[in-house]
């Protein structure tokens, strides 16, 4: 995580890893988190999506799916959010922290 006020420097350093197959997915996830910490959900989305195309640990994959779902919901993109909440629940059924956010998304959609 970037320290307060160091987001730009952190992102610049992480971007140097984007062409490295071993670290690219993890770097995209870290960049997404950095944008999230700045309140830039829209910018974070593309990095969450890209992180999911590469090798991540199980925990990192959960974080990417869940972060993406939360960001889509924050941006008012409820259908996309619902899809990723449901995928996260399907892949990680024991992670109960998803449930409140999923419920809020269902409410947003009117279900």
Image (cartoon, helix red, strand yellow):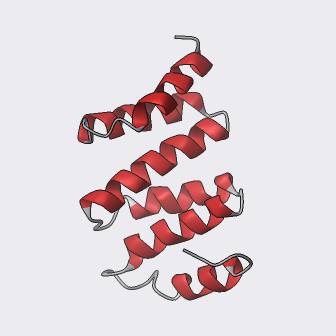
Vertical side of 72 occupied by 101: above or below: above
64 or 22: nearer the viewer: 64
Vertical side of 16 occupied by 107: above or below: above
Q: Residue lying furthest top in this view?
A: 111
On screen, residue 1 versus residue 58, left or right, reads: right
Image mark count: 0
Q: Quadrant of residue 21?
A: bottom left
Residue displayed at 32% across by 66% down: 54
Residue displayed at 44% across by 46% down: 66
Q: Residue 86 location, x and y as percent? A: 37, 31
Vertical side of 80 occupied by 23: above or below: below
Residue displayed at 60% across by 68% down: 34
Q: Residue 16 location, x and y as percent? A: 52, 88
Q: Residue 6 location, x and y as percent? A: 69, 81
Residue displayed at 61% across by 82% down: 10
On screen, residue 82 versus residue 89, left or right, reads: right
Vertical side of 62 occupied by 76: above or below: above
- In the rendered image, the quadrant that contains the N terminus is bottom right
């Amino acid at each position: 995580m970037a320290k307060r006020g160091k987001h730009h420097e952190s992102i610049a350093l992480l971007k140097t890893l984007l062409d490295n197959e071993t670290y690219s997915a993890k770097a995209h996830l870290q960049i997404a988190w950095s944008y999230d910490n700045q309140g830039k959900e829209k910018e974070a989305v593309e990095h969450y999506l890209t992180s999911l195309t590469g090798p991540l640990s199980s925990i990192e994959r959960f974080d990417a799916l869940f972060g993406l779902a939360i960001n889509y919901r924050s941006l008012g993109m409820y259908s996309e959010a619902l899809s990723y909440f449901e995928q996260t629940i399907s892949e990680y059924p024991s992670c109960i922290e998803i449930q409140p956010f999923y419920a809020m998304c269902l409410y947003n959609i009117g279900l």
